[in-house]
Image: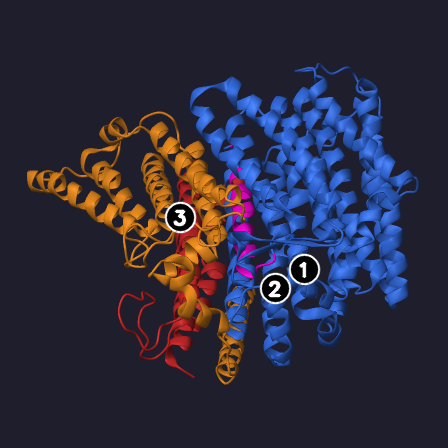
Amino acid sequence: MSRVHKIFRKFYKIGLVLFLAIFLLFIFDEIQNLDIKRYLSEHYISEGVQETGAINLVTSVLYDYRGFDTLGEATVILTAAATLSFMTPIKKVKMLGTEFTIIIYQTIIIIIPFLVVLGMNLIFFGHISPGGGFVGGVILAMIPILVTINYGITFSENKLKPNHKSLLEGIGAIGFILLGLLGIFAGSNFLASGQANFGLGNPGELISAGLIPYLNLMIGIKVGAGLAAIFNSLIKEG
Amino acid sequence: MELPYVVVIILFYLGIYTIIMNKNLIKIVVGVNIVESSLILLLILISFKLGGTAPILDRKYELVVDPIPQALALTAIVIGGSLIAVMLALVIKIYKRYGTLNVDEIRKLRG
Amino acid sequence: MESAVWIILLPLLTAFFLGIFKLYSDKLFYSLVIVSMVIYLYLLILVINDSYPPKVYSIGNWGLLGINLMVDSFSAMFLLIIAILFITVIIFSLNYIKVNKHKFIILTYVMIAGIAGMVLTADLFNLYVFLEVSSMSSYALTAIKKTDKSIESSFKYLIMSTFGSFFILLATILTYYLTGTLNMAEISLEFKSVPFMIKSTIMFFFIFGYGIKIGLVPLHAWMPDSYEASPIPYNVLSSGLVMKSAIYALIRLLYVIFGVEFLTESGILNIGVFWGVLTFIIAHTLAYQQSNLNRLLGYSSIAQIGYITIGLFLGNEKGLIGGSFHILNHGIMKGTLFLVLGIFYYSLKADEIEDIQGLGYKFPVLSFTFVVAALAIVGLPPFNGFISKWLIIEAAIEAGFFYAAFFILVGTFLSLTYYLKVIIKLYTKTEKKTLIEKPDLSLKLPTFFLGSLCILFGIVPSLPLSLINNIPKFLLNNSEYIRILLGG
């Protein structure tokens, strides 16, 4: 009896999911027949470069038009890092892992400078080429992660202490808000850069786009430190 | 109806199904990840225009794809990544305390 | 309207600075907590005072191109709840929390920032981001005791809540796809030309997603567990603010984006009222069976959410006033109950109904506060809960939902039974128990403050109602809201 009941319940759930999926399919089908207005994005495409000074429109949306969202997501990373750091035990744990050959140890040492250059490039050229603070921060976070994987958690934490990581994270987040406050001090609103007459420069040059490169740098520091902290916490858990 | 939208729907409900039906905690987290990917795919699809270039206006362009969903996708990725990290940490903690990943067995152990 | 953005920035800045100070100096840490709390209180009062007529603040001075914050009476009422609960909880937890105290305070600040952001923003995607900020810190605060139960309930909360977030995100993306904008006012104007079926689907996604976060009955499974396992000061904020901010977001979306005509046409108002009735009947029944006081109060919270849902889904002026007033009142009443329970737990490790036997003679004033708050939450006259419940009943009769009005009376009886059970236990004589720790003034003072508000708002309801009476103007008639948001 219970077996039949179980099978029935399973089919019921599958049926429910299938029904919802088909329903959504019809909705999608219907949506595509509508004519869709895109005046906001058209405005961004036609005026965005003049208004923000950044050639990379995604960056200009992220850090200028919708900079407040970026502050929110930076807070989410910080919260996640904070959560993981209180959940991990303080004591040093032995990391599971394999011994690597000398080739890998030597290659890592060669790779690290390139990673630094690549990460910095992505951060500083975020407004004129593909890239930005998030991507650059992830690349920078790769360095402590690689070190942790190869040389073990003790060595990695000795080189870059957890306290320093949370300090860096805090500095990045506070820096973002302080840069935003510059807009208020300049007589405009929070997070205003072009609107508050910070020199936008010539679009396409390194020093241009007002506050965007500096905001990129702050987010880069924050994301890098945050992800490295998250990874190390997860390693310590296991 | 374009095929990519069908893929989005399949992925979305595959993930939902995984979250609802699976008993293994890791698989539930995988399901969450699948749903998140489907939503990011949807965002990219929305911004897509046939023949459009990436929204980086450093050379001549005729048609540029919509930059807003791409920015939203970045935000969604970051939020999703943070959620997954916290989830995995909790799963590790649960596994350490109960020695199992099965929902039913955890419930039994707790009594 | 500079101060509106500071409502979000100050807790964030404080949290980031606290994260740095924690590494170096304890003294700096606590002085910053106190200083920023006082400034924050001042800012909140400033903004609440200035909330009528509504003001718009444009982030980055972009106008409609960027993100806008808007303060109207509905959000001002939430800022009032933040002002009342946040201050009391921080003062209470300075002495109460023993494990991970620094992290608790930092995460509470982040959570307040998220809730303030949700309440103030007028942008759909920004709403989602701040929702995630506040939920993320909620998961962390649920797990902060690091016991088996708290880890497990935090995971459950995390999975269910993320499940809801996905539907909210899906609906947000579809809305952008249909309208090409994320500003609520522009969406509302564009939505007039969207077909009925698509609009209903998006509405269903929003309601399902937020329904999980609110804890309406079939979707409430995470809530009692998380109440049982998390520190009690967090429970005050959770029942008073986290759940309520989700219901705020839902109501804001429904009334502003979809408009009250569409809500009536699609019949969601009837469904909402029915759902509310179902929620509180089931939650009251489940609450009666609990032996753990935290779980009992958790189920009671779900039941009160049912009343609020009824009030807000009635779609008339009185219902909105009653529902909003009940949001405020429930925050205060449940806060008082939880704080008294927190003191019992602090001094005797008592959180089962059996454990509190005879405490009425040991802590006469505290127990009296508990009784006052319990009677208020049941809805007996001279207290504040009575007035808001009465308003909801009146509105239900006015809107023709006689069954809802009848069941609210039934629900009052149901809740009276289990609260009486607790109160009788409190005043049953028993042999002497030894105190583990004596509660000092910093724990008692916030409790008495909240308890006295229960009586104050019951005797002088016009005090908060002068603020709340403006709420329906911008919800029932969304064109007014849209005009101000577009014009600002």
Q: Label 2 sits on what residue type?
A: Met
Q: Tell me the quarter of the picture where residue C312 sits.
A: bottom right
In this structure image, what is the colour of chain A? orange
Choose the circle earlier in sequence order: 2 or 1: 2
What residue sits right under mark 1 in the picture?
C252
How far apart are the two marked residues, 1 and 3, measured between alpha carbons? Answer: 33 Å
Q: Nearer the viewer, residue A117 or A104?
A: A117
What residue sits right under mark 3 in the picture?
A211
| Secondary element type, mark 3 | loop
How far apart are the two marked residues, 2 and 1, measured between alpha carbons? Answer: 10 Å
Residue reaching furthest left? A103
Image chain in blue: C
Up/down of C406 relative to C433, above or below: below
Q: Which residues are magenta?
A: C122-145
Q: Are marks 2 and 1 on the same chain?
A: yes
Q: Tell me the quarter of the picture where residue C429 sits.
A: top right
Q: Chain of mark 3?
A: A
Up/down of C374 relative to C95, above or below: below
Q: Label 3 sits on what residue type?
A: Leu
Q: Which callout, 3 or 2, points to the residue nearer the camera?
A: 3
